[in-house]
Every structure is written in C-alpha cells, then in structure tokens.
Image (tube, rainbow, N blue to C red):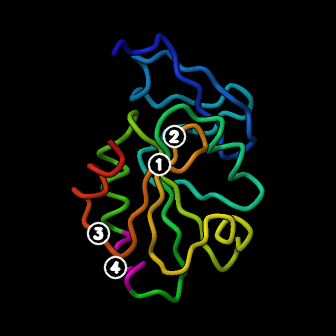
Amino acid sequence: MDTPASIHVACTGCGAKNRIASGRLADHPVCGRCGADLLPGEPVELTDDNFEAVTAGTELPVVVDFWAPWCGPCRTMAPQFEQAASSLRGRALLAKLNSDDHPRVAARFGIRSIPTLVRLDGGREVARVSGAVPAAQIVRFAS
C-alpha cells in the first residue's frame, strides 16, 4: 500500500485539523493555529470535550489509555505507555483519558475495568485490550 503524501492530525489544544507531509511526521510538527506540538512522542491528554475532534480528525492510529489516578495497575503501566509513545512518534498518537474526570467518553466505550487500551482508526474502535501491558505489546497493538 502506498503511503499518502500527507496525513491529517488534529490538535489536542485547539482542535484545528493540520495536514502534515508524510515524510515529516517525526519532525516535531506543530499546529498551524496555536503552535502546540502535534505528535509530541509522549501521551497527550484527552477530555470529554476534545476526544471526538482529536480521534476523528487524526488519520494516524490513536491508542487511548482509559485510566484513573487511584488505579495501581494504571500507575504501573504509565511508564510503559510513555515509552511506547516515544517509540511510536510519527506513526501513532498515544493518549490518556482519566475515566473518573471524563465519564462521558468512558461510558460511550463501555469501559468497565482499567487500564483499558482502545485503538481507534478514523475515530472508530478497531481493537481493545484490558489490563496493564508492557511497552512492546503497546507498540504492537498500535501498529
């Protein structure tokens, strides 16, 4: 399959949809509207308010970690998720959504246990895994 000439990535800060040349995805692209780093190589925070715009407006795979601060396995997996985000820079967007603070999205996806990883392509769920997983498995899950 041919790589498209450009990819759309939605800004988590202002919601603007940005077109990035495929060959420049790993070059720290920034939002044309607000200047925020679009693919920072670390997990981005999603909320009830920006979830739809970011996940539907990003043509790269988006892997969302549904978590909560009181969850021990979530805290254990956090460094693994950060490591995977760094490894996947320019190939996928890794995001975290605190299911306690943002219950609308968690309810929409029927999140019953955390941590739960959901992979979205074009805003649609294509895969899910529950429980703490190592960085290598997160990278495979996103690819």
Q: CA distance from mark 4 to mark 3?
A: 9 Å
Q: Which label's residue is closer to the chain start, 1 or 3?
A: 1
Q: Which label's residue is closer to the chain start, 2 or 4?
A: 4
Look at 72% across and 35% down and name the residue there.
34
Q: Which residues are magenta?
A: 73-78
Pointer 2 residue: 121
Q: CA distance from mark 1 to mark 3?
A: 18 Å
Confirm whether the magenta stretch covers residue 104.
no
Crowd tier of the residue under label 1, counting other residues whose Cα lies within 10 Å: few below 14, some 14–19, many 20 or above: few
| Quadrant including the C terminus | top left
Q: Give the percent coordinates (x, y) of residue 14.
A: 75, 41
Q: CA distance from mark 2 to mark 4?
A: 26 Å
Look at 53% across and 22% down and name the residue there.
7
Q: Which label's residue is closer to the chain start, 1 or 2?
A: 2
Q: CA distance from mark 1 to mark 2?
A: 7 Å
Q: Amino acid at mark 2?
A: Asp
- Left or right, residue 66 beside residue 47: left
Q: Amino acid at mark 1?
A: Val
Q: Give the percent coordinates (x, y) of residue 10.
A: 64, 36
Q: Give the percent coordinates (x, y) of residue 134.
A: 25, 66
Look at 68% across and 65% down and name the residue there.
108
Decide which of 43, 100 is in the foreground and name it.
Answer: 100
Decide which of 2, 54 is in the foreground and name it.
Answer: 2
The answer to whether residue 133 is above or below residue 58 is below
- Left or right, residue 5 beside residue 19: left
